[in-house]
Image (spheres, rainbow, N blue to C red):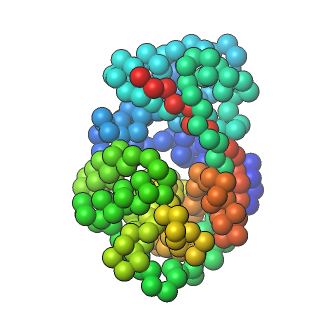
Amino acid sequence: MDHAAVLALFDRDMREGARPDAPGARVERAGKVVRQTGAEHGWNGVVWSDLDETTADAAIADQIRHFTGLRREFEWKLYGHDKPEDLGSRLRAAGFTAEPEETVMVAELGDLALDAEPPEGVRLLPVTDRAGVDLVAEVHEQAFGTDGTRLRHQLLAQLTGEADTVVAVVALAGDVPVSAARMELLPGTRFAGLWGGGTVEAWRGRGIYRALVAHRARVAADRGYRYVQVDASGQSRPVLARLGFQPLTTTTPYVYAL
């Protein structure tokens, strides 16, 4: 994989040319920043910027005014190659809090082994309705220890309003949800985004996450996408590397709370 070329394509397709990720969201360019203003329970934040030492502080202040004026908590997704180099320090000085850094990992679908299946006794169930969404949110809360309310609202809105842009799947052991994940498929891009892959603690280490990645990648390949992309935690990075994913850059969410 040509790292520099794929990184430039990723920035152009998924960041500077970002599309709304849910019904009711709006993506717009404000000066040298691209931001999404979401619905009440949607994602709000900055996805791309082209700043330097002379423009960064004013751009940060503009985004704070915009989102706080709407009473929205928001996130500035800072990537490892973004400029200026001290942008993270400037965000912290402006009141943002950094969450754990993740690795952006990318694979070309033609290079991936897509034959991984879940272990015996576990089946994959496509999510198409509110009951399935509730199962995904339940897994999310158990796997990550965080509230699944926003995920529940966003995924249900996507399935209801733009079902062709999202694929969600839950792994069931019998009737018990033990793992879940989703994929966003935005028209006009070459990257399918893999999101939210999580397994409850007692079921980790059995190949379920690997099977969920392979399942979603097969769907992306069938729909004509060239690449799949993951914001990977330290826990999932080794699994993805064994599947054929390569690190592209890093990303750190900087959150501005109300």
User: At 62% from the left edge and 27% from the top edge, which residue is drawn?
Assistant: 50
Q: How many marks?
A: 0
Q: Nearer the viewer, residue 198 or 64?
A: 198
Occupied quadrant, residue 180: bottom left
Q: Position of residue 235 (x, y in %)?
A: 64, 58
Occupied quadrant, residue 89: top right
User: At 48% from the left edge and 21% from the top edge, which residue is drawn?
Assistant: 63
User: At 57% from the left edge and 28% from the top edge, which residue is drawn?
Assistant: 97
Is residue 75 left or right of 147 when viewed as pictured?
right
Is residue 111 left or right of 60 when viewed as pictured?
right
Q: Is residue 98 above or below residue 109?
A: above
Q: Nearer the viewer, residue 238 or 193?
A: 238
User: Which quadrant does the C terminus fall into?
Assistant: top left
User: Which quadrant does the N terminus fall into?
Assistant: bottom right
Q: Position of residue 176 (x, y in %)?
A: 36, 72
Q: Is residue 166 above or below residue 242?
A: above
Q: Position of residue 251 (x, y in %)?
A: 63, 41
Occupied quadrant, residue 48: top right
Q: Is residue 232 above or below residue 20?
A: below
Decide if residue 3 is in sight here: yes
Is residue 94 left or right of 148 when viewed as pictured?
right
Q: Position of residue 112 (x, y in %)?
A: 64, 72
Decide if residue 225 is in sight here: no
Q: Is residue 21 above or below residue 78?
A: below
User: At 53% from the left edge and 36% from the top edge, which residue is drawn?
Assistant: 47
Which residue, as the protein is rendered here, is positioned at the far front? Answer: 202
